[in-house]
């Protein structure tokens, strides 16, 4: 259970957060250019530019030949710009380091692409082998079922033939031969 002091601190922190949120929401500029508050504050009068030694920065015009770059567009919307320095202003050590890093990254990407291609080829080979083995196992199962049905049919035929033979054998009367005794349990003639 919070103590009275911690309750007081939590209440103060909540009030500060609420007031900060309200103030931020009023100054938020929506994409349509409207401010978040229904009654926007009056715009301050523009002040005269202070004289400086540097000329004001202007954005370089984007030509139709320049491809759209979402990152630079986002930076431009935020008021930031990026311009590549000319070759004469580039530090040769930084250019060399950057080129080496880019080459290393490109080599690592190529190795990763080769590893992916090899892994995909291995996967495809294993997948084909599995499918071949599954097809062979299915063929063996079907062959086993066919042979099992044929064996069962042969067993039934054998049992029918044996039953017919036994019935026929029982119908025939034993023939009495004077020189041979009859088997025990057989009726005499």
Image (tube, helix red, strand yellow):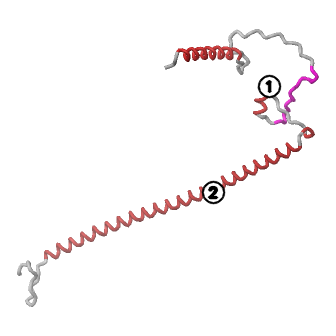
Left or right: 48 as drawn, with respect to 155:
right
Quadrant (top left, top right, bottom left, bottom right) of the C terminus: bottom left
Query: Which corner quadrant of the image does residue 185 belong to?
Result: bottom left
The numbered dot on residue 172 is none
Left or right: 36 as drawn, with respect to 56:
left
Question: Which span of residues is magenta-colored?
Answer: 52-66
Residue where numbered disc 2 is placed: 121
- Residue 118 sits above or below residue 86 on the image: below
Q: Earlier in the sequence, mark 2 or mark 1?
A: 1
Secondary structure predominantly adopted by residues drawn in magenta: loop
Q: Residue at x 68, y 17 (%)?
A: 24
| Residue in front for this viewpoint, 19 or 178 | 19
Query: Which corner quadrant of the image does residue 48 belong to?
Result: top right
- Residue 68 sits above or below residue 141 on the image: above
Q: Residue furthest right?
A: 53
Q: Residue furthest left?
A: 188
Q: Position of residue 116 (x, y in %)?
A: 66, 52
Query: Which corner quadrant of the image does residue 72 belong to?
Result: top right
């Amino acid at each position: 259970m919070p103590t009275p002091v911690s309750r007081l601190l939590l209440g103060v922190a909540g009030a500060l957060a609420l007031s900060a949120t309200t103030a931020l929401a009023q100054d938020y500029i929506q994409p349509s250019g409207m401010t978040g508050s229904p009654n926007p504050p009056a715009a301050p009068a523009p002040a005269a530019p202070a004289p400086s030694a540097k000329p004001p920065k202007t954005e370089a015009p984007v030509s139709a030949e320049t491809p759209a770059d979402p990152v630079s567009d986002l930076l431009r919307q935020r008021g930031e710009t990026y311009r590549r320095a000319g070759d004469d202003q580039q530090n040769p050590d930084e250019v060399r380091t950057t080129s080496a890093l880019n080459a290393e990254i490109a080599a690592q990407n190529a190795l990763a692409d080769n590893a992916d291609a090899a892994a995909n080829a291995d996967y495809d080979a294993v997948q084909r082998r599995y499918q071949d083995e599954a097809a062979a196992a299915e063929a063996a199962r079907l062959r086993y079922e066919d042979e099992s049905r044929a064996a069962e049919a042969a067993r039934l035929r054998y049992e029918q033939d044996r039953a017919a033979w036994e019935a026929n054998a029982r119908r025939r009367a034993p023939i009495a031969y004077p020189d041979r005794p009859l088997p025990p349990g057989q009726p005499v003639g």
